[in-house]
Image (cartoon, rainbow, N blue to C red):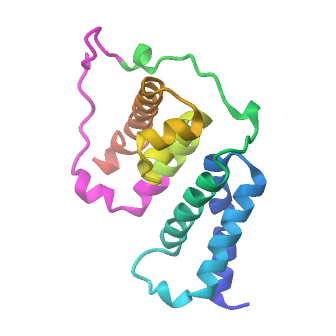
Amino acid sequence: MSLFEDQLVAQRGYLLRFARLQLRNDTWAEDAVSETVLAALTKPQSFDNRSQLKTWLVGILKHKVIDALRHHSREISDPNAAEDDDTDPLEYLGFKADGHFSQMPAEWGDPVKQVHSRQFFEIMDACINKLPAVQGRLFLMREWLELSSEEICKELDLTPTNLYVQLHRARLRLRECLELNWFGKPENA
């Protein structure tokens, strides 16, 4: 096995977690990851170290997941995968009744410089994984897969209002997690 193949195998677990979160079906996720690895093995020259291997593979997987979502749009996956989440992050994040912050966010330093940090993305990934499953899936569908609101609502049988509320809650939780675990740390300020 070559070094490139070893590196692909090392990323398989991460790719599977990402695909399972989006597809909610182990078989579909396995297929998407297998197709991603096959595409990477078929054209290894497309990866010319312009990015990290993980980033390149997720880029391929992103398209495989979108294809799978479209292909399986009429099939039903696990109906028990939906998670009811009645907690309102507004209650503990300190918002006023008019929706404005009662306390301004902590100083975030130089975001442009920190965004380029590998450590930031590792913490961002951990924060996304800590989101409730439904919110994590919606957030990644919208922000990572770049699906339109209409596509997400159709795929998950949601109203636009429900989608907005869930995305808002996910963003608030991510903000809080990043503030606590990245921006709030003195060494990163």
| Front-lying residue, 47 or 6 | 47
Q: Is residue 88 left or right of residue 41?
A: left
Q: Main secondary structure of the magenta part?
A: loop
Picture coordinates of residue 144, whole percent (x, y): 45, 53
The answer to which image quadrant residue 10 occupies is bottom right
Q: Is residue 89 left or right of residue 65?
A: left
Picture coordinates of residue 114, whole percent (x, y): 30, 56
Q: Is residue 61 left or right of residue 118?
A: right
Picture coordinates of residue 162, whole percent (x, y): 48, 24
Count up the numbered dots: 0
Q: Residue furthest top?
A: 97
The answer to which image quadrant residue 38 occupies is bottom right
Magenta region: 94-122
Question: From this viewpoint, is residue 111 visible?
Answer: yes
Q: Is residue 162 above or below residue 38?
A: above
| Front-lying residue, 87 or 108 | 87
| Front-lying residue, 101 or 151 | 151
Picture coordinates of residue 150, whole percent (x, y): 44, 39
Q: Is residue 99 left or right of residue 176?
A: left
Identified at 54% across, 47% down, the residue is: 126
**Residue 108 in magenta?**
yes
Identified at 38% across, 20% down, the residue is: 93
Identified at 28% across, 11% down, the residue is: 96
Q: Is residue 5 above or below residue 126?
A: below
**Residue 134 in magenta?**
no
What quarter of the picture does the N terminus occupy? bottom right
Identified at 63% across, 57% down, the residue is: 68
Question: From this viewpoint, is residue 136 visible?
Answer: no
